[in-house]
């Protein structure tokens, strides 16, 4: 066998190892996501590309077959940590659920503002958690004019009938694993979204004076997972937990690490290099 053939085989072997290593890292540790909207401005803006640590809180089996891209059922192998207040996280809402608040996008990046057992309230666009005011990076950019008055319910707000809106919201307690909730026809509208997301299926039915969960009559529901309340840094222009409700820990895919690439998507008449936002590349959080 000639030296050239031996050398070619070694190169192919190294490339295959690198390919398999890349697939392994992508499947279990690192993900990538493009920012499509301004809901996290100015922390993240359209055209930013971020790396996501998908092993920050748990190690799951891949949700799709590598290279082929066919979706498969993913399950948790073990936990590596718990989400913390102020973490920027990538969340995924089930496809069947997103139509409830007028979006087809299932993936979102938001900031965790309150966790299990916390009491959250928004008063005239000011956020309070357990009575302490919390600030978003964009707080100074809020438009404190045109505040939606308390009692004027916002369209699509979580939950319907609360009388809340995006500027005056709560108080509301974030559910913890093990909480026992009384269930009846008068309050099921408050808890339906939580139950549906925990089951990942439309399992709640109202049959006259009886509420059923997974086809079984229910007077109580025990919360199965810890939940979180997330808000977009662009407070005035973000669809977040004020609309789609609590996020359980299984819907959190990972923690945002840093911007690895950024290109202005609106400056299409400029050259490739002039569209690159050099000052945002490798910006961390």
Image (cartoon, grey):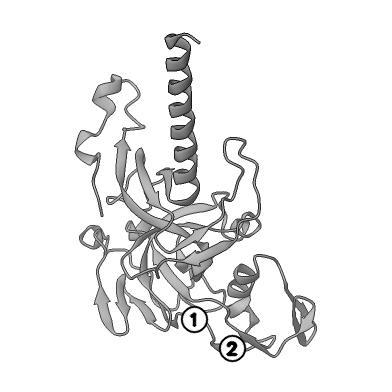
Residue appearing at x 26%, y 60% in the figure: 142
Q: Is 225 above or below relative to 243?
A: below
Residue 263 is drawn in which quadrant?
top left
Say above or below: 243 vs 39: below
Q: Is residue 140 left or right of residue 78?
A: left
Of residue 5 and residue 21, the one placed in the foreground of this image is 5
Residue lying farthest to the front in this orientation: 1
Q: How many marks?
A: 2
Q: Which residue is mark 2?
A: 181
Image quarter in which the C terminus is found: bottom left
Residue at x-position 58% and y-position 90%: 180
Residue that mark 1 sits on: 175
Q: Estimate how packed mark 1 is, as few (under 14), some (14 to 19) or many (20 or more) residues with alpha carbons within 10 Å.
A: many
Q: Could you tell me if the residues under marks 1 and 2 are in contact, i.e. CB atoms within 8 Å?
A: yes
Looking at the rendered structure, which numbered label has been put on residue 136? none
Q: Is residue 143 visible?
A: yes
Helix or strand or loop: what does disc 1 sit on?
loop
Q: Earlier in the sequence, mark 1 or mark 2?
A: 1
Q: Position of residue 203 (x, y in %)?
A: 72, 71
Q: Nearer the viewer, residue 233 or 59?
A: 59
Front position in the image: 261 or 19? 19
Looking at the picture, how far across and down is residue 76, in whole percent?
Answer: 56, 63
Density class for disc 2 (Cα within 10 Å; few <14, some 14-19, many ≥20) is: some
Identify whether 37 is placed above or below 16: below
Q: Secondary structure at mark 2?
A: strand
Q: Is residue 248 visible?
A: no
Q: CA distance from mark 1 to mark 2?
A: 10 Å
Residue drawn where x is 62% and y is 54% of the image: 95
The x and y percentages for residue 90 are 43, 55
Residue at x 42% of width, y 66% of height: 80
């Amino acid at each position: 066998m000639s030296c050239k053939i031996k050398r070619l085989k070694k190169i192919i072997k190294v490339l295959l190892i690198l390919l398999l290593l890349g697939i392994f890292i992508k499947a279990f540790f690192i993900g990538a996501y493009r920012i499509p909207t301004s809901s996290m401005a100015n922390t993240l803006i359209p055209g930013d590309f971020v790396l996501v640590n998908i092993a920050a809180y748990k190690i799951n089996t891949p949700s799709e077959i590598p290279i082929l891209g066919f979706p498969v059922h993913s399950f948790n192998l073990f936990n590596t940590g718990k989400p913390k207040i102020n973490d920027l996280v990538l969340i995924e809402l089930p496809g069947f659920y997103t139509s409830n608040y007028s979006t087809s996008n299932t993936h979102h990046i938001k900031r965790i503002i309150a966790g299990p057992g916390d009491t959250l309230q928004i008063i005239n666009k000011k956020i309070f958690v357990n009575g302490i005011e919390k600030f978003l990076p964009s707080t100074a950019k809020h438009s404190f004019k045109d505040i939606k008055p308390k009692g004027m319910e916002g369209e699509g707000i979580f939950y319907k009938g609360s009388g809340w809106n995006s500027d005056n919201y709560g108080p509301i307690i974030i559910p913890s694993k093990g909480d026992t909730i009384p269930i009846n026809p008068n309050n099921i509208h408050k808890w339906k979204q939580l139950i549906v997301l925990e089951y990942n299926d439309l399992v709640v039915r109202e049959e006259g004076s009886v509420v059923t969960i997974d086809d079984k009559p229910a007077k109580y529901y025990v919360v199965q997972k810890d939940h979180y309340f997330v808000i977009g840094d662009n407070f005035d222009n973000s669809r977040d937990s004020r609309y789609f409700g609590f996020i359980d820990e299984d819907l959190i895919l990972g923690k945002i690490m840093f911007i690895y690439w950024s290109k202005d998507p609106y400056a299409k008449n400029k050259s490739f290099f002039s569209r690159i936002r050099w000052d945002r590349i490798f910006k961390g959080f």
